[in-house]
Each structure stands twice: as structure tokens, then as C-alpha cells.
Amino acid sequence: MRKSLNLILKQFSELDYVHPEDIPNIDLYVDQVTTFIESQLSSLKRDEDEKILTKTMINNYTKNHVLPSPDKKKYSKDHVLTLILIYYLKSFLSIKDIQTLLEPITDKYFGTESELSFYELYEELVAQGNGQSKALIKDVIAKYNAMQNAFSDAPEEDQEFLRNFGFICMLSFDVYIKKMMIETLIDFNSQQRKEAADQAKEKKDKS
């Protein structure tokens, strides 16, 4: 297991985000979008036959208001950045939660020339993510080391299997807690936006 963990951590340390400057500065047709994202994220595939992104996925994201509609069937750099965010988020969030999370962001920053562009927003996320890599690796190693003294009373031939199982459970519990926190924060932010909209409507009705 230690050998496998070292290999996993090595792969994780070599993972890189899609950098904004790597995205073409011209608008793309849907086939070009899927080809580009497939080439950029192919190293994240678990199975060779897995599809990172398809036309059907893009259409569904647009239909469910997760992704803004294209302009004359062409997708901008902001569209590509949004699709990359969706790819990461969909591994642990529902489409509804992703829509709730991204909608206020795309409403305010997508395709605008505001003080903070969508490009700059994504760039900041990449910088923050890179800064967390060492801490994440350290945490995984600590969890692994903690399990090495577990199940010492089990039959010797079962100890390695049980410790590997326990390590996976520890990682899973960490994912579960963080997922629960994310969902709670999404619900809280959504409620805040609804209350603010209701207050604005009430104020407008009175005036």
C-alpha cells in the first residue's frame, strides 16, 4: 500500500490546472470546445474510454442554466473556464447544487469587463488551489501513518487489508464532511440571495 500511496502522491503532485492563458483567445464551436477540454484534462481520466466532455453534456448544462448560452453557436473563453469548473465540481455535487453555486458568479462576472473579470476570478482559484497542494499531501500522509498502528489485534494475515480499508474510510469520511459543509454553505448563500431579492422587491413596491 505504501508503494501505491507514493505513486498516487507523485501523480497528485504532478497534476496541474488548466491555466487561463492556455485557452484560445478566439470563440470556439462545440466540437473545438470538447476537443480542447479533452486534451487538457485527459490525465484525470480513470478509464481510457471515459469522456471528459460531450456535446450532450454541454447542451444539458445550458438547458439547466449551469452554463450560459453560446453566442451564435460559439463558446467564449469564459464558457470554457465555466466548463472546467463544472468538470471538477460534478464529481461530488449535483447539477442543481452546481447551478446554485455558479449562477450568481456567471450572472455578475461572465462576459463582463468589470473590476474582476471571470478570467481573473478563475486565475485566483488556480493560485489558491496550487497553494493548498502541499498541505493536502501532508494530511493524506498523516492519515496513512495513523492507520499503520490500527487493527493490531487482528490476525496477522488480515492486518494490511484492514489498514488499507481503514485508510480508505478515513479519506472517505474527510470527503463526506467537506461535501456536507459545501452543501450547507451553498444552501446558506442561496437563502441569503433570496432574502436580499425579497427585500429589494419589497422596497421597490413601497416606493
Image (spheres, rainbow, N blue to C red):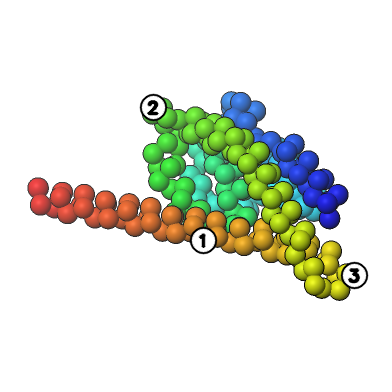
**Residue 157: quadrant of the picture:** bottom right
- Label 2 sits on what residue type? Glu
Number of callouts in the render?
A: 3
Q: Secondary structure at mark 3?
A: helix
Instruction: Say whether residue 74 is visible.
Output: no
Quadrant location of the N terminus? bottom right
Give above or below for 130 relative to 164. above
Left or right: where 32 falls relative to 179: right
User: Answer yes or no: do the residues labelled 2 and 1 have beta carbons within 8 Å?
Assistant: no
- Label 3 sits on what residue type? Glu
Q: Residue drawn at (80%, 53%), measured in percent from left and top?
A: 47
User: Answer yes or no: do the residues labelled 1 and 3 have beta carbons within 8 Å?
Assistant: no
> Sequence order check: which comes first, mark 1 or mark 3?
3
> Sequence order check: which comes first, mark 2 or mark 3?
2
- Label 1 sits on what residue type? Met
Q: Secondary structure at mark 1?
A: helix
List the residue tagged with mark 3: 157
Q: Residue drawn at (49%, 29%), measured in percent from left and top?
A: 120
Give above or below for 141 relative to 168. above
Residue 42 in the image: state x and y as whole percent: 75, 43
List the residue tagged with mark 1: 180
List the residue tagged with mark 2: 115
Residue 75 in the image: state x and y as whole percent: 56, 37
Cα–Cα gap, marks 1 and 3: 36 Å
**Residue 158: quadrant of the picture:** bottom right
Q: Secondary structure at mark 2?
A: loop
Residue in the foreground of this view, choosing between 2 and 189 = 2
Q: Nearer the viewer, mark 1 or mark 3?
A: 3
Residue 25 in the image: state x and y as whole percent: 59, 26
> Sequence order check: which comes first, mark 2 or mark 1?
2
Cα–Cα gap, marks 2 and 1: 32 Å
Give above or below for 30 relative to 170. above
